Amino acid sequence: MLAAAVTMVDGPDASETHLPAAGYRTPMYLSFRESVREAVADALEAAGYPTDDLGVEDPPEGVDATLASSVAFRLAGEAGAPPPQVAAELAAELDPADYGYVGAVRAQGPYLNFFTDDAYLADTLRGATDPDWGHLPDRDTSVVVEHTSANPTGPVHVGRARNPIIGDAVANLLDAAGYDVDRHYYVNDAGRQMAVFTWAYERFDEADLPEPERPRAEYRMVRYYRRGNEFLENADPDAVEAAEAEIDAILRGLEAGDEATYDRVGEVVDSVLGGMKRCLARLPAEFDEFVKETRFMRDGSTDDVVARLQELDPAVYEEDAWQLDLPDFEKTLVFLRSDGTSLYTTRDLAHHEWKFDNYDRAVTVLGEDHKLQAGQLRSALDLLGNDVDRLETVIYSYVDLPEGGMSTREGTGVDLDDLLDESIARAREEVEDRMADRLRGDDLTEDDVERIARQVGIGAVRYDIVSKQPTKGITFEWDRALDFEAQSAPYVQYVHARCCGILGEAGLDVEATEVGDVDAGVLDTPEERALLHTIARLEGVIEAAAVDLEPHRVATYTREFAETFNAFYRECPVLTADDDGTREARLALVAASRHTVANALGVLGVAAPESM
RNA sequence: GGGCGCGUAGCUCAGCCCGGAUAGAGCAUCGGACUUCUAAUCCGACGGUCGUGGGUUCGAAUCCCACCGCGCUCGCCA
């Protein structure tokens, strides 16, 4: 389906992995599911039924089976028998021993329920004591995840904060699913906004500007941008006209490839972007490469795209501008202005062809207001002969304030830095309150408090955003964004800290977690078995979430995992278990739990504290 | 007006793509559990016309159609 990996012609070879590379191991849950599908298909075939719809699904809570099939419903008419009878007939066709990890098949009412065997839980326990747990086998497929790509005009505000948080999680998710992932930030350094900014930076005097909100580049620089826009809106018409002439000169200079103009704009762009990187690094959202839009003007690829577009049938020359009349869109796509200059989308076409040259897949995380543009981009790329199945888009809604949207230009909105600071401050208060209440400060140093406040504070913000479907709108409210109650990051992080506490108490190195050969068979309480089954599901969750590019499913899983672990914690003493065998097995289960929750949180980009 | 997205408990959300077992959580409210491996935890109670109306189906929160409300979008901006 995907083209073979091609040589990287540019960019650092920094395939940063958040989970260690997976060793050779069969993913238990995924192979069990495959076994179930085979079994259902075999049973249907043996009984003479069509095998196009296997009806394999997750059973509801309270049903002990690991997977189920509802296929008997659909066959009732054809069989001339009620569903329960069909289910029984199918179950009779099957010998569990023929299928890996399948321990039993039972018809329960109209359902065909599949139960795992002992090897499944034993292999899960062994597999999950590996720190790589949850990382799927390498797919030998490269993918570039482009996210954030906010115009370098000023501080990152909360309105766009979903982009780096979702984007980073999507990248982590694909990495965990076995892809070679690069993270890109596309820098719009060629548009009118940057020309205005450059003009304003050169035109106004710092002495006339207000104090910056923070002593960092993007906060200092945005003052020029805001002042410039204010001038263009309010100054007298002659002055505005003169300013517009200067701004046009900058745009023409960029289009003509004038080095001096690039340098002037580049100074502003690099300065602002440098500050924005510092803010994003707090999340942390790090990038392998910052790809500048001007690059595709300078290397001739935008001109090449224009020439090829002009040859296409849907290309029309109307009102002195070259446009693409795309069949599926009401709006034509202008790709060359009447003055002969290119547009953002034209350059983005060259940008995406560059991605296709260098990666097997390209994923872009975009705000919903770019949706139409993204559709036209895809359509144009298709017309240019690209395989657009390699391009996928993740769309999210902006975060609004109760009174409306946030704007860098107008200076309305909440800065991400302020949100993170406030969240960390509240987390620190929580830690300190608990230390006072619980008399458990003896083993927490000031550094620990600082670390926990940061891990919990930033984790809570990320988790709150990444755990929701991106298409749902969010209205920002301080109290809601900073709610540390259950179903938030600290709830899940606490499970990790509990695991570390137990392992540390047992004298085990939390990082290495060497647990020898243990007998999983002694883990026979409902809580232990439920926990193992939940641990096993991680691979299925990673797989499904990666296919659909939906990291919020991993967040849902962490919550379910935490609930299951807490039930185990309540019912099954580890350090004071009745016998050594049980103690050893439970310690292995705790180690497995730690890797499960740490790696799931890792995909979400949420820190896993060893104590809190 | 056209296109796209969203609408599930008082509030915030899973579940919807791929229809199936009593629609799940948390917050809030009320009641319980810390001499115990960390109570940022756990247990219980209360709470739902799954926006509305049709349709398809043995079966619909899930698929189809219409409508209502909210958001985004429809520039030779990015």
Image (spheres, coloured by chain):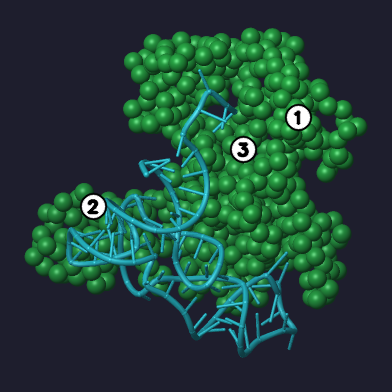
Q: Secondary structure at mark 1?
A: loop
Is disc 3 surrounded by few (<14), some (14 to 19) or many (20+) residues within 10 Å?
A: many
B23, above or below A446, in the image: below
Residue of label 2: A53
Is disc 2 surrounded by few (<14), some (14 to 19) or many (20+) residues within 10 Å?
A: few
Residues tagged by mark 3 and mark 2 found on one chain of the structure:
yes
Q: N-terminal of the two: label 3 or label 2?
A: 2
Tell me the quarter of the picture where residue A221 sits.
Answer: top right
Pick whichever, A120 or A91, lies toward us: A91
- In the image, what residue type sits under mark 2? Asp
Pick whichever, A350 or A334, lies toward us: A334
- In the image, what residue type sits under mark 1? Ala
State the separation of the CA atoms marked 3 and 1: 33 Å
Q: Colour of chain B?
A: cyan
Q: Residue at x 76, y 61 (%)?
A: A427
Q: Residue at x 65, y 13 (%)?
A: A252
| Nearest to viewer (mark 3 / mark 2) | 3
Residue of label 1: A235
Residue of label 3: A148
Whether tag 3 and tag 1 are in contact, CB under 8 A, the answer is: no
